[in-house]
Image (spheres, helix red, strand yellow):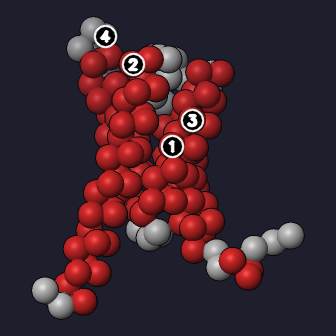
Amino acid sequence: MDVVAMRKWNAIWRQAAAFLIVLALVLAAASAFHIAPSVGSQPAFTSSDMVWTLCGMWFALAGGLVSRRYGFAIAVGALYLGLTCLAAYFLQRYMQLSIVDLLRVNALSTSVSILAGMVGACAGVFIRRLKPGRRPA
């Protein structure tokens, strides 16, 4: 196997590992501390949404440190959007609202959590890419 192919496989495994790290941290926080994306029938940005947003940003930062690519932020955004859609689906089963209505009502909290996750992933990549001589004092 030549060097170029080896670097390509290393990059692919690094992306997979970063995604699995973020997914594991999110699932661990959801099961152990009950920190997860929440969807409600009324538009509100509560303290639980803020805690989820901040935790999601730190989780994505950890994944960004492993990933080393800015495109990882798109994967984090898709993961957080998928988790919110999953929460809306389970809530929709018990209410008379459609999934689209639930996502429209929770658009603020959903977009804030997705953007915070993407910022966290980009910050992790930026920190990882800093050269030792260019670090701010």
In the picture of the structure, the residue carrying the numbered disc 4 is: 95
Which residue is located at x 29 percent, y 30 percent? 86
In the picture of the structure, the residue carrying the numbered disc 2 is: 31
The quarter of the picture where the C terminus appears is bottom right
Expressed as whole percent of the image width and height from the top left, the position of residue 110 reads 49, 38
Q: Is residue 70 left or right of residue 129?
A: left
Q: Earlier in the sequence, mark 4 or mark 1?
A: 1
SS for dot 2: helix
Q: Is residue 130 left or right of residue 38?
A: right
Q: Which mark is residue 59?
A: 1
Expressed as whole percent of the image width and height from the top left, the position of residue 7 reads 29, 81
Q: Earlier in the sequence, mark 3 or mark 4?
A: 3
* Contact check, label 3 and label 4, Cβ < 8 Å: no
Which residue is located at x 51 percent, y 50 percent? 62
**Residue type marked 3:** Cys
Few, some or many residues within 10 Å of mark 3 (<14, 14–19, 20+): many
Res. 100 in view? no
- Real-space Cα distance between discs 3 and 1? 6 Å
Which residue is located at x 57 percent, y 59 percent? 124
* Contact check, label 3 and label 2, Cβ < 8 Å: no
- Real-space Cα distance between discs 3 and 2? 14 Å
Expressed as whole percent of the image width and height from the top left, the position of residue 120 reads 57, 53
**Residue type marked 2:** Ser
In the picture of the structure, the residue carrying the numbered disc 3 is: 55
